[in-house]
Amino acid sequence: MRNMSFALTTGQILDDTKDVTRRLGWMFLKPGELVRPVKKCMGLRPGEKLDVLRDPIRVLHLRREPLRAMVDDLEYGFDEVRREGFADHLDYRWPWNPR
């Protein structure tokens, strides 16, 4: 089972409010596979251990999608931001970068 880091959305994973994620380089996954959600999995110092956040997550669906789709359809964009766990985040609650 592969580890997937959720350092930025640890709280959302723990309270089970995140049900979608966007990742580069994870197209090798198949629906039905399990991934272990961890706080951090790369750059661990010698002796550091994985901080497993919860039980494994089952992959339900994969698709490629340009990030632009979230800006082209703002209703979709805001819904996806919410599903990613950023609805109340000061900076990340927008489908585009406001800065």
Image: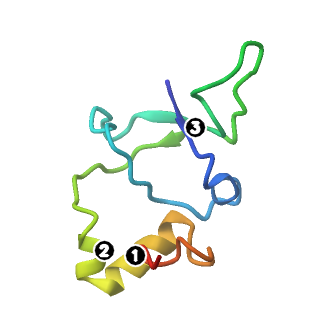
Mark 2 belongs to which amino acid? Answer: Met
Q: Is residue 19 above or below residue 35?
A: below
Mark 3, Cα crowd under 10 Å, few <14 / some 14-19 / many 20+, is some
Q: Is residue 7 above or below residue 52?
A: below
Helix, strand or loop for disc 1: loop
Helix, strand or loop for disc 3: loop
Residue at 42% x, 78% y is: 79
Foreground of the two, 91 or 57: 91
| Residue 24 found in image quarter | top left
**Which residue bears the numbered disc 3?**
56
Mark 3 belongs to which amino acid? Answer: Pro
Q: Residue furthest bottom?
A: 75
Residue at 27% x, 38% y is: 27
Helix, strand or loop for disc 2: helix
Q: Residue furthest front?
A: 99
Foreground of the two, 31 or 80: 80
Residue 7, image x, y percentages: 63, 46
How far apart, in angstroms, are the residues tagged by discs 1 and 3? 28 Å
**Which residue bears the numbered disc 1?**
95
Residue 5, image x, y percentages: 56, 39
**Which residue bears the numbered disc 2?**
70
Mark 1, Cα crowd under 10 Å, few <14 / some 14-19 / many 20+, is many
Residue 50, image x, y percentages: 69, 26
Labels 1 and 3 touching (C-beta < 8 A)? no
Q: Is residue 62 above or below residue 83?
A: above
Labels 2 and 1 touching (C-beta < 8 A)? yes
Residue at 74% x, 22% y is: 49
Mark 1 belongs to which amino acid? Answer: Pro
